[in-house]
Image (spheres, helix red, strand yellow):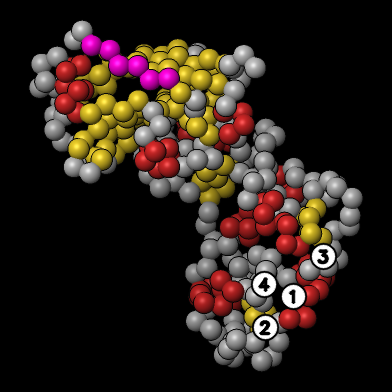
Amino acid sequence: MSPGGNVYQEDVLESRTAFSDYDIVSTETEVRNSSFRKSTAVVGGKPGMASNSAVHELLECPVCLNIMYRPIHQCPNGHTICLNCKTKVHNCCPICRQELGNIRCVALEKVAELLELPCQYQFLGCQDIFPYHSRLRHEQNCRFRPYNCPYAGAECSVMGNIRSLVLHLKDVHNVDMHDGCTFNHRYVKSNPREVENATWMLTVFNCFGHQFCLHFEAFNIGLAPVYMAFLRFMGDDHEAKKFSYSLEVCGNGRKLTWQGVPRSIRDSHKTVRDSLDGLVIQRKLALFFSGDGQELKLKISGRIWKEQL
């Protein structure tokens, strides 16, 4: 994703107050109305013509404002709605309040199959257009789609590009920022038997022109408390695979080492944590590293390097 841009939050940006009663969150609508949106966007990409704007508007659901895909439903008066919103509005037309029933708008579905549409991330830099049914599949993996905030200490809904998320982590979450590819950290807990499902620390490292998130956590696997450290790459997976990292915990004559590949922040924090793709230390073993067993004292060092391709 190109540098620049702003952070936006996944709040409902209602442009039609008549539908605010339904409390429907629209991801595509939020993106289009966010401060990321550019005033001038040019559709390029592969040969083809973007759809006529009037026809394009016919495909917008009046509630969530997303492009509608089959099955497209309509009320007896001809007002259309997407399948997801049909359930959320309790089968009541949001325009005329008539019962929606199960009437399909087959004509609009057939017209839609003939259209080519720009990617919804056009204003973020994607210049491709796609046949109607291919657009959704592309958008799920579009390299211009924004990233979720990697902070795991709270359910943060902020999304943005890498540059804006780094600023967000620093200014909003007060995350420590460090330059360099090696690090040493010391984690201390006065009562290691009080283990909660909580994030302990997130630190961001700047090296090789990229940012890496070091997570260290205490949580339970079943009834067994564990401590885990892992690294995530602020970028896409194909870039993350160009790097490797190692983590080492040592103390009281013992040493445990982990080596792996940082995971992209496209993978959620929970996904990475639950996969145990990192340095995992069981509590009993962690207390051996601490020495006296009364207080948790873990010394963790690490290194990030770029693989020679």
Residue that carries the numbered disc 4 in the rendered image: 70
Instruction: Say which quadrant the C terminus sits in.
Output: top right
Rendered image: mark on residue 109: 1
Q: Is residue 247 visible?
A: yes
Residue 295: percent from left, percent from top? 14, 22
- Identify whether 80 is placed above or below 226: below
Residue that carries the numbered disc 2 in the rendered image: 104
Magenta-tinted stretch: 254-259
Q: Is residue 260 magenta?
A: no
Circle 2: is it few (<14), some (14-19), or many (20+) Cα within 10 Å?
A: some
Residue that carries the numbered disc 3 in the rendered image: 115
Residue type, label 2: Arg
Badge 1 element? helix
Residue type, label 1: Glu
Distance CA(mark 2)–CA(mark 3): 19 Å
Label 2 vs 3, first from the N-terminus: 2
- Identify whether 31 is placed above or below 209: below
Residue 3: percent from left, percent from top? 67, 32
Residue type, label 4: Arg
Pointer 2 with pointer 4, Cβ within 8 A: no
